[in-house]
Amino acid sequence: MSDSRNNRGEPTVSPKEAPVRRTRFSLILLIPVVAILIAGWLAWEHFATRGPVITITFETADGLTPGQTQVKNKAVTLGTVQDITLSDDMKHVDVTVQMNANSSHILTDHTRFWVVRPRINGASITGLDTLFSGAYIALDPGMDDGHYQKSFKGLESPPGVRSDQPGETFWLVSPSLGSLGPGSPVFFRDLQVGEVLGYTMPPGGKGPIVIQAFVKEPYDHYLRTDSRFWNVSGVQVGLGAGGLKVQLKSLQALFSGGIAFGLPERRRNIDLPDAPANSVFKLYASEADADNARYHKRLRVVTYINSSVKGLTSGSQVTMFGLQIGTVTDVRLLLEGPTKLPRVRVDMELEPERMLSNWDDRIENSREQPVEKYLQAFVADGMRASVQSASFLTGESMIALQFVKNAPVTSLTYEGDIAVLPSQAGGMDGIMESVSTITDKIAAMPLTEIGGHVNDLLAHADGRLNSPEVTQSLAALRDSLQNLSRLTKTANQNLPALMKSLQGTLSNAQSVLGAYGGDTDFHRSLQNMITQLTQMSRSLRFLTDYLDHHPSALITGRRN
């Protein structure tokens, strides 16, 4: 073995082998791994729970904020607004919404979106909670049979009915809309049971307006095939026999309008079938008009008026003895030529069911309507049509069919199938016409000649009174009265003595009668004479009393 030395001559020492230690696992290495795993899980969850991105078009983005405004249905968040951009034509805004994954199945062509913000609709205020939480986009999924889509046009106002709200939709036809609008309430027996969804104008603005109304369940089953709808908007004021009547359905109906429905009174006890969905009904102006609609039969008549028809319009009443039997349908002025005086044509519709309680199909199918027979007889008896005042406060007029005494004989005429009723001035015009007739008769009297004759008569009367014959007659009358007075005085003086003498005679006769006695002819004759003398004495006493109080009776006789 060689001994190795270094340069210094020192022996070299070989290095020892270093001990090798096994490295332990460190927890610090897990931190980035866990971070990577969490980031991956979050990324997976983000993309896994992320739904489709949809676009909703609105007229304005008022109240919408990207990253904050949410899409909700029944207070459950279904998405968040990501971006809001203005359209290229600058007429609307496009709102980009990131929806949740579990909302994909409700994005169909039936889905509706609208912005919930504070709104005042008539007497109702909605969306007040958004004053603190901010506006949000509401969602209504609609029916389940829709097709999937990602672009929508938002509603500018909330829909009247949600897809999950039970009930039925009906259609109303009206010549005018009035104060009705979306959200107007629908009443049944003063209980709100639905609302108006909207309306559709006819093409070209001609024809009736179609109104869509929704009635909630179970009240939709109270709507029958014979039900009537009428307008209850605002305050209804009327003047009747009971005085001033004011009717207000509700504050909401006052501001936003409203409609009501019900059955006619004569049909309420009849079991009628329910009205099917989307049935069409006529909307009447008032409950009275709806009740009058039960009269289905109409008879067209016309009359011509030669006096003022102020206050008479289409819809005015036609009455007989104060009871309505029809309605005025048209009032127009006729100018038939320069040689004829102008006159007013009044078209009317009489309702036979108001006059004949036993009207039925057998009467309707007969060859001649019995109402026409009645009209012919009435006209022959003096029935005339005249314009009368229905209300002095409102100035409303009506057509009254009344019987005129000593009316000229005439008959019912026809213009085709329309009966023509004769007319006569009525109301103030009739009074003025009568006054004018009396004035004409007075003007035709020879008042000057009558005045001359009266003057002659008075002059002759003065001459007669101043004549000697009248003076002598008055003197003779005075003497006669004086003689009558003396006669009355003498009678008053002599009558007591006469009465006393008669009483003595009666006493003597009774004594003789008592002394003679017996049932003989002389006794009976004497008894009759005494009775007659007694009656004469009583008559003389009555005569004396009467002459004391009425001495003139000797000349004028007795008066009752």
Image: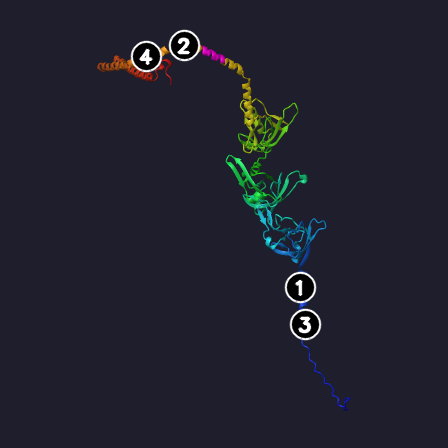
- Which amino acid, mark 2? Thr
Dot 4 or dot 2, earlier in sequence: 2
Side of 338 where 544 appears, left or right: left
| Rendered image coloring scheme | rainbow
Q: Distance of mark 2 from mark 1, alpha carbons? A: 148 Å
Res 82 quadrant in image:
bottom right
Residue 108: where, in percent of width, then height? 67, 52
Residue 371: where, in percent of width, then height? 57, 29
Q: Main secondary structure of the magenta part?
A: helix
The label on residue 42 is: 1
Check contact, mark 1 vs mark 4: CB within 8 A. no
Confirm whether the magenta stretch covers residue 462. yes
Residue at coordinates 63% horizontally, 41% vertically from top-left?
Answer: 210
Q: Distance of mark 1 from mark 4, alpha carbons? A: 152 Å
The label on residue 471 is: 2
Check contact, mark 3 vs mark 1: CB within 8 A. no
**Which residue is label 4 attached to?**
486
Of residues 67 and 331, the one nearer the viewer is 67
Q: What is the crowding at mark 3: few (fewer than 14 residues within 10 Å), some, or many (at least 20)?
A: few
Region rendered in magenta: 455-463
Q: Distance of mark 3 from mark 2, alpha carbons? A: 167 Å
Residue 356 appears in the figure: no
Q: Distance of mark 3 from mark 1, alpha carbons? A: 21 Å
Res 220 quadrant in image:
top right
Q: What is the crowding at mark 1: few (fewer than 14 residues within 10 Å), some, or many (at least 20)?
A: few
Q: Distance of mark 4 from mark 2, alpha carbons? A: 23 Å
245 vs 36: above or below? above
Dot 1 or dot 4, earlier in sequence: 1
- Which amino acid, mark 1? Leu
Residue 117: where, in percent of width, then height? 61, 51
**In the structure shown, which secondary structural element does the residue marked by tag 4 occupy?**
helix
**Which residue is label 3 attached to?**
29
